[in-house]
Image (cartoon, coloured by chain):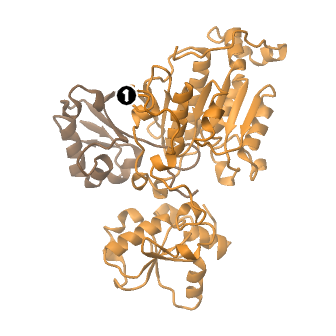
Chain colours: A brown, B orange
Amino acid sequence: MQIHIPTPLRAFTDKQATVSVEAATVTDALTALTTAFPAMQQHLFTPEGKLRSFVNVYLNDEDVRYLPAGEATATTANDELTIIPSIAGGSAFCCPCCCL
Amino acid sequence: MPATLDHPAALPTLSNEEIARYSRHLILPEVGMEGQQKLKAAKVLCVGTGGLGAPLALYLTAAGVGTIGLVDFDVVDESNLQRQIIHSQSTVGKLKVDSAEIMLKGLNKNVNVVKHNTMLTSANALEIFKEYDVIADGTDNFQTRYLVNDACVLTGKPNAYGSIFRFEGQASVFATEEGPCYRCLYPEPPPPGLVPSCAEGGVLGILPGLVGVIQATEVIKLILGIGEPLIGRLLLVDALGMNFRTLKLRKNPDCPVCGTHEIKELIDYDQFCGIAPPAAVGPLEVSSHGKVDASANIVDGIPQMSVEELKARRDAGTQPFVLDVREPHEYAIVNLGVPQIPLGSLEARISEIPVAKDAEIVLQCKSGARSQKASLALKAAGFTNVKNLAGGITAWADRIDTSLPKY
């Protein structure tokens, strides 16, 4: 299945916009992603291994948090996983730490 | 009625001049005379007159929205003009709200522009918002995003939301009665350390145009009560692939502001986002263009070197090893002729540093924040004499070699 990587996180996937993984569930897919790109781990998961609250993961157009089986939801090769990070940009800069 | 607004019982009439001006709306049955009158009666607040606020306010003004409020405390800078088309060459240096008013009044003399030349804060947001029907959030930082969201929920005003990053945008309509709010989607902001830094900054100039016009479209739909607003949907815009996708958003019953209503008043959003309010003097980029105070000479154990000191060392022939930690495309704009390893790959390339671990090393970036992070990384890797160039190459261009470009 395909995992769509948003621009801010492509720095950790060798600039790839989509990553193909073989996975039976959403959890498997995310594990395959962080195994292939270990730097993604800290951006997606807390040190306790929970998905960070400012990262949303969608299976096709549904928020994984609202699926009955959540991250254990079964996936097929035709499914698409999309990671949606929060972005704040609007006028000039992406973040408060930036060069005002 | 989440998708339509309450309108005053008696809508304002249109003059003959207005009828001629809005004829292409009047002959659209979905707008028509009544719709145009609703637009004339409507009051829309644009939070920010930057990349998103510029096309938003321009199109709303052209469309005949009667009252446009503008919140901005900034002044127009030349680097804004790459995307903020409400400002122009001739208004560089003017207050953004004044500059925007000139353009809007020039476009449509009938528009009533209300200028709020202030930073939106927890102290003034509710007072400002209550005068308007729709709020359009075109701000650029997480604190203001959460502030706008909460103030919209608390005042019951829909929020036409848009945000952008490099080549990507998001849009939605938040805080309607039945729909989700920004906090339902993002309960918490990312910690500052995980927010993309300057190295990944920048934005394609036309992208805010695209997203701002989507926000304007949603505002108009809300005022007219037509179509399907982006309530409960998040639109993702990818300008490079030119893909548009929508994802379903759910109202979170546990949302502290729109679900459980446990947040009843505005909070301290700097604290919520884990950000110290900009200090008057500090080593990091928020305040690095001025001189660095003596008390800030050591930050987190990293001595801060001033550009004057580095210049004196260069002149004396005792220049330490200086490493530029910016990205290659930034180095191509301007550099100090020193070696370069981007912050992101520093740890992997530490063996390339050609000096001993106890040698003096000065790290430099655009304005001092990334090089501070790099300094901490080198210190952690066992380098014992690491310093940060306070203010970076921007301070160098400001105070040492004014012939250098600043970006």
On the picture, is A42 further left or further right than B220? left
Give B168 or B70, whichever is nearer the viewer.
B70
Give the residue drawn at x 17%, y 37%.
A23
On the picture, is B358 further left or further right than B282? left
* Observer able to see residue B279: yes
The amino acid marked with disc number 1 is: Asn
Give the residue drawn at x 54%, y 91%.
B317
Q: Quadrant of residue A71?
A: top left
Give B151 or B1, whichever is nearer the viewer.
B151
Q: Chain of mark 1?
A: B
Total marks shown come to 1
Give A86 or A29, whichever is nearer the viewer.
A86
**Residue B352 position (above or below residue B189):** below
Q: Quadrant of residue B61?
A: top right
Give B216 or B73, whichever is nearer the viewer.
B73
Give the residue drawn at x 46%, y 63%.
B327
Q: Quadrant of residue B83?
A: top right
Numbered disc 1: secondary structure: loop
Percent across and percent down for residue B372 are: 45, 68
Percent across and percent down for residue B53 are: 63, 37
Percent across and percent down for residue B186 are: 40, 37
Toward the right, the furthest residue is B16
**Residue B326 position (above or below residue B179):** below
**Residue B99 position (above or below residue B256):** below
On the picture, is A5 further left or further right than B78? left
Quadrant for the C terminus of chain B in the image: bottom right
* Observer able to see residue B401: no
**Other-residue count near label 1 (Cα within 10 Å), few / some / many at <14 / 14–19 / ≥20:** some
On the picture, is B98 further left or further right than B6? right
Residue beneath disc 1: B252
Percent across and percent down for residue B364 are: 49, 72
